[in-house]
Amino acid sequence: MATLNEVFSGLSVKRRYEVWFLRVGLADRSGAWWFRYLLMNPGRGGCAGNPRGMPVQVWATWFPADGKPQTFIQGLPLEGLDISRRGQSPLHLRMGENSIEEDSCRGSLHVDGHAIAWNLRYRSTFAVTLSNKGWIGFSRTPHSDALFSGQITLDGRSFAGEPLGFGVQGHNCGFRHRNFWRWTHAYFSRSGQPASTLEALVYEMPFGLVFRKAVLWHDGQRYVFGKLQESSVSKEPFHWNFHCVGHNGLRLEAAIDGRGASVHRLPYIKTDCSGSFEVWNNSLASASLLIQTVGRADEKLETATGAVLEMVGGP
């Protein structure tokens, strides 16, 4: 059975990134974790000479509710990498004590005197392909309404639970990173009802075109919006407001607020190895969503810390 986590890149490819990532918002609201398993330019050994350009990388970022984010990145050589074949299911990517599979992942990093380890399991009811441009790149979400269980430790501090948290597991790939993009994923817990999620993506395409799409998962139904209209977008202050209308008359008004101490700015290496660019991410963002349906009362969904907002380039 095909899955959205299937490996796309062969190990001989000289210019390409492929990443499997997780955003875990802790159930006790003490913070959120962001994990990335990155494969970059395997056919040329990453970006030789750049200490942050190893062909295999494992990232862990801690977003505490009461402080500034911390990122830990460990680069690894291709030797010892055990990865499923291109297009093969189920996924497995293993490098010593670090691995990700279809519904679990683990890691163990020792970076700058810090020790971070995790062993997680996750399940979901909804998956979606947000963008698929083939060789150019794609953005897939194998687990959109993910529930996480297991344990994470940071320098002896333990986070554990059944469930531990909630969020998303995604899978992106591309020949190069886009010159600009805006992306959000919001997880709305609902008392006595299944969670709802909203994911939206805007990015530049060739010939001056712009990709725009939002997907709502609500009451067991998928709603796709291809005409997302941005009403306000900014890095300082960090926020994104947009609205969209579906074919069935359903209308969304979304406000994603990423302001505060949890805004994180990280350099990503370009796949042509010419340098880096800055990625803004807040994995403890707030979000509000107004759902308007003809003939029905308006619904409002809100989360104080259950969203992630990410931007590159643009305003």
Image (cartoon, rainbow, N blue to C red):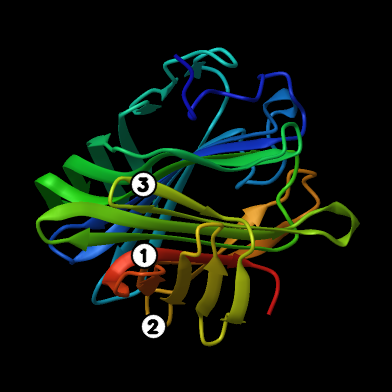
- Gap in Å between the C-alphas at discs 1 and 2? 13 Å
- Which residue is located at x 26 percent, y 41 percent? 117
Would you say 43 lies left or right of 96 here? Answer: right
Identified by mark 3, the residue type is Gln
Which dot marks residue 186? none
Please provide percent x and percent y for residue 65. Answer: 25, 72
- Residue lying at 68% horizontally and 46% vertically, measured from the top left: 50
Are dots 1 and 2 in contact, CB under 8 Å? no
Q: Amino acid at mark 1?
A: Ala
Residue placed most toward the observer, 49 or 101: 101
- Badge 1 crowding class, 10 Å Cα cut-off, few under 14, some 14 to 19, many 20 or more, is many
Residue at the right extreme? Answer: 207
Q: Earlier in the sequence, mark 1 or mark 3?
A: 3
**Residue for point 42% across, 16% down:** 90
Q: Nearer the viewer, residue 114 or 205?
A: 205
Which residue bears the numbered disc 1?
307
Q: Which residue is mark 3?
A: 221
As drawn, 187 above or below 171 = below
Nearer the observer: mark 2 or 3; the answer is 3
Circle 3 SS class: strand
Q: Is residue 118 above or below residue 235?
A: above
Q: Please provide percent x and percent y for residue 140.
A: 53, 40
SS of the residue under disc 2:
loop
Q: Quadrant of the C terminus?
A: bottom right
Q: Closer to the N terminus: mark 1 or mark 2?
A: 2
139 to the left or right of 43:
left
**Residue 141 percent location from the top left of the image:** 46, 41
Q: Please state which amino acid type lies under the numbered disc 2.
A: Gly
Q: CA distance from mark 1 to mark 3?
A: 20 Å
- Which residue is label 2 attached to? 260
Q: Position of residue 48 (x, y in %)?
A: 72, 37
Q: CA distance from mark 2 to mark 3?
A: 33 Å
